[in-house]
Amino acid sequence: MDRELIAAYRFFKEHAGYILGESARCALSLARAERAGESAGLTVQWDDDSEEYQLGDCEDAPPPYVLVAFVLDPRNGRRCLASLGGIGLNSLRDPYRRVVAAELLSEALETLVTEQAAEIQATAHEIMEHQS
């Protein structure tokens, strides 16, 4: 692993929540998703969430920032590949923002890979039928 990936791994290990015993695997997965998403030209966009914030069990008041985050398809810029709303942050520099971004990049990449696999399968099927 290179330095950037190790630094990202450490960030996610510290700031993301995990299932007990899975923190190393999940942190590395998020670090890889962040890198792969950036390499694929994916970006996470943020906006104010217009929906009413739902207070959690331990909250007295909504956080100062309530945002929605989404990843648009870089091929056309209109289709949403992944999104999440109701993201409560105490500041715009909250580390949780990066965690959410990596999770959305992971979801968007999975969508793109699934679609590409389906396209390849359909093309292979057409070729096989044409040869028959």
Image (cartoon, rainbow, N blue to C red):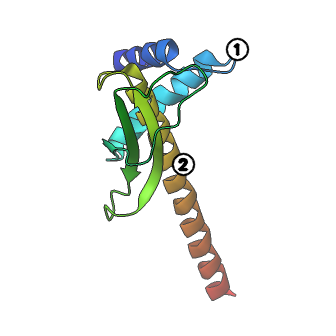
Q: Residue at x 47, y 30 (%)?
A: 32
Mark 1–mark 2 distance (CA, rounded to whole Å) = 24 Å
Residue 49 occupies quadrant = top left
Hey, what amino acid is under mark 2?
Glu
Q: Earlier in the sequence, mark 1 or mark 2?
A: 1
Q: Which mark is residue 5?
A: none
59 is higher (above) or lower (below) than 110: above
Q: Left or right of 2: which side holds 18?
A: right
Identify which residue is drawn at 70% across, 15% down: 20
Q: In the image, what residue type sits under mark 1?
A: Gly
Quarter of the rendering occupied by the C terminus: bottom right
Q: Position of residue 119 (x, y in %)?
A: 54, 68
Residue under label 1, please give it: 21
Which one is in front, 85 or 27? 85
The residue identified by callout 2 is 110
- Which secondary structure, mark 1? loop
Residue at left 37%, top 48%?
50
Q: Is residue 84 above or below residue 5?
A: below
